[in-house]
Image (cartoon, rainbow, N blue to C red):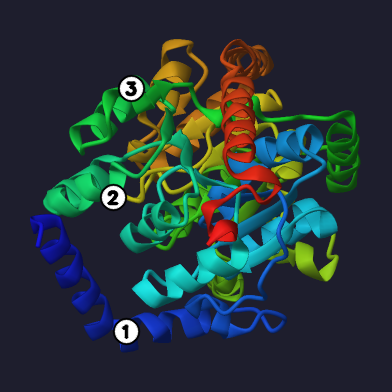
């Protein structure tokens, strides 16, 4: 028995031992219209036919993969496109972005039987994993059924790299079954190689996040939003986390001492925290309007809670400045390019491990301000509010960075299309070995 087989057996045993805790978490991450049995691979068996499968773990990955999914729908109308997520919020975002254009399932837990069952019933021609959601048994099941696995926008944060390296044998055995990695940066590519992915299978494509689509409809809707808020300075704090909202509210209080009419649009990262964040605002003496209730902030309202899904880009486009959350607390940061793409000045904290290269690119182009605490954030906002020319320069620099770095989408789409064609040629119209056995 190979060492890798012993390690895989130990991994499976640990999963089974932890299954009560895992299932408790999964019980919460569900939606009424989806049976929890999907987590065990219990999905309807698909008929034979060409099928593309994209996995995007949660909301962030769904947003990143959205241009790729749209491109695949356009290029391959003959294929069914299935999207899987791990989280309920990710599922909701898939529904809001694509409706009936794609099918959705929850990804099964990485138990051997569940993953084998899932791949056998889904029968994908090709699997595309967005960013870093690597599960040994799932990828192993794809290999057994002859399903090529591609990683799009591949990234490995410091923490993820350390974790995978701690289980080096398992990681190396898993990555030998990955057919192609489109890494978002040279550092990510090198980490995939260090973990055991063959050098010739790794390519630096750049970050898919640069290929954000900003259409006229979004800008028109944002203009209507801004009109409804009135003539006042507006800043957005997007994708915020616990411990961060307190700092943002303190910064807003400082801003309001000079600009009493200023409005903060506060958008927590996780929907399950909307009510708690609303209560936090009220406990700080803030009058809060809730977007989900259709409430429009009046002159006395200083905080608008963006407690809806899919509107963050609209808020960014309607604002004078944007703070991107997960960066004043050690989370790793979220998508800095969303406000940059619509020309809104970008401010962040220092915790940006999840997007090191993007953060550095924006900083080098003087398209991002970095702050370390509430006082520094208030100072940065006041400087921008006081100086319209500075706001315009920072916003235009951010938009220029996004425009200059587009291209990852075309590279990734071309690779996926080539591999898809090869799989169809190798296995016939069903597209996978699974359909042949």
Q: Say whether disc 2 or disc 1 marks the residue closer to the N-terminus.
A: 1
Q: Is disc 1 placed on a helix, strand or loop?
A: helix
Q: Quadrant of the N terminus?
A: bottom left
The answer for how far apart the CA atoms under marks 3 and 2 are is 16 Å
**Badge 2: how crowded within 10 Å, few (<14), some, or many (20+)?**
many
Which residue corresponds to the image point at 45% horizontal and 58% vertical from the top-left? Answer: 241
The answer for how far apart the CA atoms under marks 1 and 3 are is 37 Å
Q: Is disc 2 placed on a helix, strand or loop?
A: helix
Q: Say whether disc 3 or disc 2 marks the residue closer to the N-terminus.
A: 2
Query: Is 274 above or below relative to 382?
Result: below
Q: Name the residue tied to disc 2.
A: 174
Instruction: In the displayed orientation, state which residue is furthest to the front.
Output: 437
Q: Is disc 3 placed on a helix, strand or loop?
A: helix
Q: Name the residue tied to disc 3.
A: 200
**Horizontal side, residue 126 vs residue 306: left or right:** left
Q: Name the residue tied to disc 1.
A: 19
**Horizontal side, residue 197 vs residue 367: left or right:** left
Depth check, front residue: 105 or 383: 105
Which residue corresponds to the image point at 73% horizontal and 44% vertical from the top-left? Answer: 315
Label number found at residue 353: none
Q: Say whether disc 1 or disc 3 marks the residue closer to the N-terminus.
A: 1
Residue 373: name its quadrant: top left
Q: Position of residue 203 (x, y in %)?
A: 40, 22
Contact between marks 3 and 2 (CB within 8 A): the answer is no
**Badge 1: how crowded within 10 Å, few (<14), some, or many (20+)?**
some
**Horizontal side, residue 226 vs residue 192: left or right:** right
The answer for how far apart the CA atoms under marks 2 and 1 are is 22 Å
Q: Position of residue 113 (x, y in %)?
A: 40, 76
Which callout, 2 or 1, points to the residue nearer the camera? 2
Q: Position of residue 239 (x, y in %)?
A: 54, 51
Residue 144: name its quadrant: bottom left
């Amino acid at each position: 028995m190979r060492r890798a087989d012993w390690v895989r057996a130990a991994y499976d045993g640990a999963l089974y031992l932890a299954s009560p805790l895992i299932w408790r978490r999964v019980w919460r991450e569900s939606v009424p219209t989806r049976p929890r049995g999907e987590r065990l691979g219990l999905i309807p068996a698909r008929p034979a036919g060409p099928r593309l499968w994209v996995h995007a773990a949660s909301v962030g990955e769904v947003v990143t993969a959205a241009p790729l999914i749209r491109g695949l729908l356009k290029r391959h109308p003959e294929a069914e496109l299935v999207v899987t997520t791990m989280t309920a919020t990710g599922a909701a975002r898939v529904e809001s972005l694509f409706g009936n254009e794609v099918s959705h399932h929850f990804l099964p837990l990485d138990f051997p039987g569940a993953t084998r069952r899932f791949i056998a019933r889904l029968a994908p021609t090709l699997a595309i994993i967005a960013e870093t959601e690597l599960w040994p048994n799932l990828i192993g099941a794809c290999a057994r059924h002859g399903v090529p696995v591609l990683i799009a926008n591949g990234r490995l944060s410091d923490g993820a790299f350390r974790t995978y390296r701690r289980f080096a044998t398992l990681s190396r055995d898993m990555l030998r079954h990955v057919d192609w990695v489109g890494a978002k940066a040279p550092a990510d590519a090198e980490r995939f190689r260090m973990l055991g992915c063959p050098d010739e299978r790794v390519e630096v494509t750049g970050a898919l996040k640069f290929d954000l689509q900003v259409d006229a409809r979004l800008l028109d809707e944002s203009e209507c939003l801004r009109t409804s808020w009135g003539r006042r300075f507006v800043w957005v704090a997007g994708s915020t986390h616990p411990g961060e909202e307190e700092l943002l509210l303190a910064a807003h209080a400082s801003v309001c001492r000079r600009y009493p009419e200023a409005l903060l649009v506060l958008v927590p990262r996780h929907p399950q925290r909307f009510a708690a964040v609303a209560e936090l605002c009220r406990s700080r003496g803030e009058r809060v309007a809730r977007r989900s209730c259709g409430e429009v902030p009046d002159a006395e309202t200083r905080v608008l809670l963006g407690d809806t899904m899919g509107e963050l880009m609209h808020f960014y486009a309607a604002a004078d400045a944007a703070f991107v959350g997960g960066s004043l607390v050690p989370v790793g940061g979220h998508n800095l390019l969303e406000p940059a793409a619509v020309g809104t000045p970008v401010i962040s904290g220092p915790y940006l491990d999840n997007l090191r290269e993007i953060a550095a690119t924006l900083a080098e182009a003087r398209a991002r301000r970095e702050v370390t605490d509430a006082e520094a954030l208030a100072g940065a906002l006041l400087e921008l509010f006081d100086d319209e020319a500075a706001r315009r320069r920072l916003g235009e620099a951010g938009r220029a960075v996004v425009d200059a770095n587009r291209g990852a989408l075309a590279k990734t789409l071309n690779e996926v299309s080539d591999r898809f064609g090869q799989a169809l040629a190798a296995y016939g119209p069903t597209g996978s070995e699974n359909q042949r056995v």
